[in-house]
Amino acid sequence: MARKIVLTSGKGGVGKTTVCANLGVNLASLGFRTVLVDVDIGLNNLDVVMGLEKQVVFDITDVIMGRCRAKQALVEDIRFPNLFLLPSSHYSGKTHILGEHVKSVLNMLDSSFDYILIDCPAGVDAGFHRAVFSANEAIVVVTPHLSSIRDANKVLSLLNEYNLSSKGLVINRMRGDLLANGEMLRVEDVVRALHIPLYGVIPEDDAISSACSVGGYLNSQESTRAFTLLCENIHNGTKKIYDCEMKYRGFMGYIRRNIKRKV
C-alpha cells in the first residue's frame, strides 16, 4: 500500500512543484516506486518541471472520464526507472471533478507504488480540497518569509479538518549567506511559528532555477544532499537537516558572503 503524500503551500511561488519533482527523483533513486500526481487542473506545470511534457498522451481527467485506464495515463521517466508521472489537464473547464474522483484514480495505482506524491494547487479553494481529500499525509512547503508563513498557517488550519496521519514542514529557498548575516528568518523561527515537525531545509540554489527554466532536474551537489536528507527523514523518520549556513561560517565564509552580496 502506497504512502499518499500531498504537497501544499497556500501561497504560490514557494517552489512546491519543484520540491515535489525532486523529492520524487530522490525517492525513486533510493529504489522506491514513486508516482507524481498533478492535481492542478488548468494550471498544471509538473510535466514541464520534469521535462516530460512532450510525452503526455492522456491525463488524470481522461482516466476520470473513462477514456483510458490509470496505468495508460502514466508517463515513465526513463532517466529514473522507478519514477512515473500522472499529468493533469491544461483545460480548466473540468470544475466538476471532485476529491472522490481523484481518490478513485489513486486507489487504482495504490498497489503498484510505494509513494504517491500529490502536487496540490496553490491557494485554499476547491483545488486544494480536491488534492488533500486523496492524501493520508501532508507536507507544507514554505519559504522563510512572513507572507508564506501566514498562508501556511491558514493551510494547516484546513488540514486539521482531514484525517491525516502526519503533517510535516519543508523550508525552501533558504539562503545561508543571509542567515549568517542575520538578515533572514532562522529555521527555528519558522518551525516555532507553524508548530509542526521539520522534515527538511532546501537551500536557495541557482541550479534549481536553471533546471526549472529548461525543464528537468537539478544537478547540484548542495541541493541533492538536502533532498537526500529530506527523503531519508520522510521514509525513516530521522531528523537530519541540511545546514545551509555551514559554508558561510568562519573567515572563508565571511569572504563568500561578501562575494555573493556584490554579485
Image (spheres, helix red, strand yellow):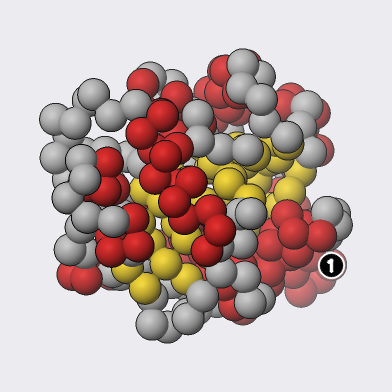
To which residue does mark 1 refer? 250
Q: Visible in this render: residue 252?
A: yes
Left or right of 134? Residue 65 is left
x 50%, y 36%: residue: 134
Drawn side of residue 134 relative to residue 159, left or right? left
Residue type for callout 1: Gly
Circle 1 crowding by C-alpha within 10 Å: few under 14, some 14–19, many from 20: few
**Which residue occupies the foreground of this view, 107 or 259?**
107
* Residue at x 85%, y 57% (from the top left corner): 238
Image quarter of residue 190: top right
Locate residue 131 relative to residue 59 in the image: left or right: right
Residue at the image position 14 percent from the left and 40 percent from the top? 91
Residue 210 visible from this viewpoint: no
**Vertical relation: 125 (above or below) 60:** above
Please provide percent x and percent y for residue 147.
52, 25
Placement of 55 over or under 134, stated as above or below: below
Q: Quadrant of the N terminus?
A: bottom right
Corner quadrant of residue 49: bottom left
Q: Position of residue 85 (x, y in %)?
A: 38, 62
- Secondary structure of the residue carrying numbered label 1: helix
In the rendering, at what x and y percent does residue 7 appear?
A: 53, 42
Q: Nearer the viewer, residue 73 or 117?
A: 73
| Residue at the image position 51 percent from the left and 31 percent from the top | 132
Percent across and percent down for residue 77 are 38, 75
